[in-house]
Image (cartoon, helix red, strand yellow):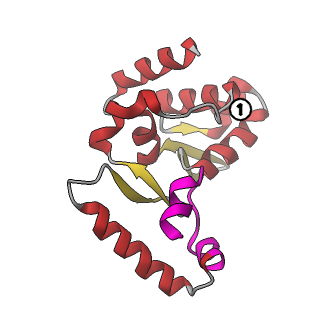
Amino acid sequence: MLEAALFTTERPLTKRELARFLRVSEKEVERLIDELKRRYKSEEHGIEVVELNGYKLSVKPQFAGLVARFAKRSELSRGLLRALSIIAHYEPMKQSDLVRAIGNRAYQYVRELERLGFIRSEKYSRTKLLKTTRYFKQYFGIKSKSDLKKVGARNHEV
């Protein structure tokens, strides 16, 4: 059941959520996650357990670029994609600069992008500093800054 939950979720699931779902302790969830991590560590598997504000199954980085064309990206609205692309291009980026660029919707987009695991933020004076995550790079098959242009072009084709 743990594996199925991690496979189907759109966002990382916390230990607490998983414990409640599985009706076990958080300690037992940790043990099960460790077991899954060991199982998927071998080269014969193309997925891994990713830990980022929770847990989910994700394609291993070495395969992400190869299978990116099969990934479902429709859950990301144009607004979210625009905010994410701006953050990725200028990272690290101040949230206040993002608000100036796209307006007050930026606050909602930042919350949603953090929830999805694409960005992380840290307090920076009276604003936040925004950066993309490893999960963002895996999801879009990005290995370098030049790959960002390819992703942008692909998303404009849709």
Q: Taking the image as drawn, is residue 92 in sight?
A: yes
Determine the image quadrant of residue 75.
Answer: top right
Q: Which amino acid does label 1 sit on?
A: Val
Residue located 79% across and 34% down the image: 104
Q: Residue furthest right?
A: 104
Q: Which residue lies furthest to the left in this view?
A: 43
Give the extent of the magenta segment.
Answer: 1-21
Q: In which quarter of the image is the N terminus?
A: bottom right
Secondary element under disc 1, as helix, strand or loop, is helix
Q: Toward the viewer: 104 or 58?
A: 58
Number of numbered discs on residues? 1
Image coords of residue 38 (percent x, y): 29, 70
Residue located 55% across and 34% down the image: 72
Residue 70 in the image: above or below residue 129: above
Question: Which secondary structure type mostly characterizes the magenta part of the structure?
Answer: helix
Determine the image quadrant of residue 41.
Answer: bottom left
Image coords of residue 45 (percent x, y): 28, 54
Residue located 40% across and 41% down the image: 138
Residue pointed to by mark 1: 99
Q: In which quarter of the image is the C terminus?
A: top right
Residue 61 in the image: above or below residue 19: above
Image coords of residue 118 (percent x, y): 53, 44
Instruction: Residue 13: say if magenta.
Output: yes
Relative side of 119 to 99, left or right: left
Residue 16 in the image: above or below residue 152: below
Q: Taking the image as drawn, is residue 142 in sight?
A: no
Residue 114 in the image: above or below residue 30: above
Residue located 54% across and 33% down the image: 87
Image coords of residue 98 (percent x, y): 65, 31
CA neighbours of label 1 inside 10 A, class few (<14), some (14 to 19), many (20+): some
Determine the image quadrant of residue 157.
Answer: top right
